[in-house]
Amino acid sequence: MTRPYHCLFLLLGLGVSCSALAQVAALPVPKDSLAVDAKGTGDPYPRADAMVRRNVSALMERETGKLQAWNPGDGIYGMWSDGDSTNPPPELEKRFRDTFERCVPLDHAIMPNGFQWGGDVHDFVFSPQAMQATLALQGALFAPFGSTTWKILRYSSYLTTKGRKTRLQLYTRLMWFVTTATPTQLRKSVIKMSADYGYRPADESLRKSSGWLAGDSVTMLSQQVTPHVNTFAMVTADTLGGEDASDRQTVPKSPDHPAKPWSLNCLVTDDFAKDWLSKVKPGSTERWQIKDISLGYVWQLAVLPLGEKTEPYTMAHVDARLARERNLQPEQVAALRKAEQKELTKEAYRDFPKSRARLAEIAALHDKAADVTDQLRRGGYVEKWASMTKDITHRLGMNIDDKIDAMAIVIDVRFQQTIQGLRRAARQIRDFLSSL
Amino acid sequence: MYQTVKQVVQLNAPGAEVLASSSDVSKDPFLYGNYWNDRRKFVTTWGGHKDQNGNDPGGRARMASMINDGARAQPFTVDRDHDVGNPLSFYLYIARSKTHKSGGGQIAKDEGGHYYWSAADSIQTSVQMRKFGLFGGWRTLYSNSWGWGGAFSSPNESIFDYYQNDPVRWQGWQDPQVNPQAQGNSKNVQMVSYPAYRGAWSNDARGMNKVVNEDEDSRRIPTDFVPVPGVGRAAEGGIARYRDLDWDQRMDSKKGDMTDETPRYVVVVNLPKNRVRDSVTALGISADPSEGGKAPSLGWMSMRLDTQGAKGGGAEGVRAAAAAQVYFRRPSALWTRADGLDERANLFSPFWSARLVDLDSREKAYILTRYAGVTK
């Protein structure tokens, strides 16, 4: 019921965890844990925290009309929807293609309305310059893609749900890079460098699942700034070989070399990278080639526009949260965060009667199911099953009465387990509701 | 049924008597016999021991096509193949998640020629992202499927193979079918191919493999232990008996739809003379002072029914006969079949109504002779 919503919010960096109703070991949560103090005049986070909280509640109450935007003036529709793809701005890919074909710097690409190129790399996932230095020490190139300095493309989008526009707003920042690092090398560096900004890997449980196909090539991160404000980031890179059929269709080709999908000179333009690529590869007599390079991007999703102005406040909030955990053991840190998430969940339910009523209804249904199962068991279901099965097997000329009796005992035990399980679930939901 | 007839007659004509009806053998064995003979010929038993070998066209094929096509044709059955919406599906231009539900139930022949009910459902979800952000192809980060299913199997065929993704045997299954608009004889039987579980194998082979594998795991315990109860249909060849119209014998294009030949229910009613509503009893108008008439001048309006005199022929009252039958029409405006065809009469669909019909010549002759009172 509410769980998928919570998971979605986490993914969107909106800050409510998937651990609703989770059993949490008792750990005192600091009283002011859910409060957000302003870290100086101009701190946007108290407002952002309150806004996310209202939006989570509006979604829980299924009242999309009550959603609030950070700045209703600057969002675009069509980039974010709750179902299958809507119509994205059709010219977007064409603009990129034109840029590559004309071999102009990426940040000179004329973008549709609502997209802005900028050089403000503050309050980002990591410092690109620091990342460049770190990877260079490991013998790998990390450089801007298609421009001579680090550039970020930013836009803001609104959610369209069931074809209707809403005011749920996300701020997106994108930074492209080229690298010769391996996926594992890149992932390790990204986790290390982004930890300085309070980012933690957010893909651990996904990576343990059998359905995870991306290996190390994708890193998902989240940065909790306030109880409700999470900033989500993803870093990924992929080789420029163009071996993939889907790439050959969608990735633009150089007009000079139709056979080669990318022109090195157009895509790698800063002096450091050009110099690097003009040299011979270590441990090889060959020069660096385009197939050795990966193109990657950093994707940052936040509920408010980030940059130089917000960075001091972000860091102040993150530092305050980290300071709380500095002297704790890792298990204690995990328990503290879990307890805090539970408080957040409680808070969300406390103010919203519709959601509480839904939960109470679910508890009642569990009890009803337990009653029905109990009646079935007391009504002699298992005995009837055994005699019926014996009758069938006798007619088929089989004599396995002893096995049927043994099976009947097993079935009876399963009945009892089911009844207990249903009652336990109902009790847990009620306990949760009464603890609000 | 006789009580219902009496009640309807009493409500419409208080004091009337049911002289005969198709449901009262003691009053009129002839009408009764006609009706019940027609009815016996009209509905018959299919499946079970009546159709042990499952030879087609027969009950199994009929039931299978009604259920398989019916499930598709009835707008009130739940669609089992659809996308799952928010929050399991979302689209953020750079990343997207899609969740799709596949599957269906069917009644189809296995390799041994036995019909089996089986159903399988799967759900698959995937998360994809663009390789290069705002451009480039999609790369799948996460993809997984889950499946579940069930089958109506018989103890002596303890292993039931789901209709699997074997391109030779099971990619689809075939079944004899008669076009619902065509004449119901064996000439019109044609083999129709269906995708197994509504194409779930092509939508989500991984999920369907889980159905098959997990079913094999869970089956291991009961099959060498005890047969699962409720599947004891071995003697019936996989399908229990059921009743439906005897369509194979009775469908004749010259007579139109089979529904025009449904059994006729005839009622003959007698209303005693003194209960007949004439101008005196109904309106209080009478020209005869001896009957309490107050307005002799209105005598011209008086309409009296004289059943006592020479013209009356000696009958005790007024008699009427009527016939009714049930008929089947699927109202296409409300409940359109997915295939757009008309539907022949059957006992699987609920579109039956009753209507009054004219007495046919045989009935008229019989009723005149027996009930007109002329010969009495």
Image: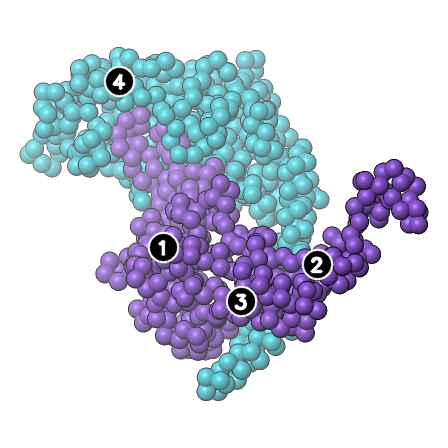
Chain colours: A cyan, B purple
Residue A240 horizontal side relative to residue A350, left or right? left
Examine the rendering and report whether any part of residue B24 can be seen. Answer: no
Per the rendering, the mark at residue B39 is: 3
Vertical relation: A55 (above or below) B222: above
Find numbered disc 2 in the image and state the secondary structure of the residue it sits on.
strand
Name the residue located 43 percent from the left edge and 29 percent from the top edge: A81
Find numbered disc 1 in the image and state the secondary structure of the residue it sits on.
loop
Examine the rendering and report whether any part of residue B360 can be seen. Answer: yes
What's the residue type where badge 1 is placed?
A: Ala
Q: Give the residue pinned by disc 2.
A: B319
What whole-number distance in Å separates the C-alpha atoms at marks 3 and 2? 27 Å
Which chain letter goes with mark 2?
A: B
Which one is in front in this view, the residue at disc 4 or the one at disc 2? 2
Q: Compare marks 1 and 2 and give the one earlier in the sequence.
A: 1
Q: Give the residue pinned by disc 1.
A: B182
Question: Which image quadrant: the N terminus of chain A?
Answer: top right
Per the rendering, the mark at residue A95 is: 4
Q: Do marks 1 and 4 share a subunit?
A: no
Q: Compare marks 3 and 2 and give the one earlier in the sequence.
A: 3
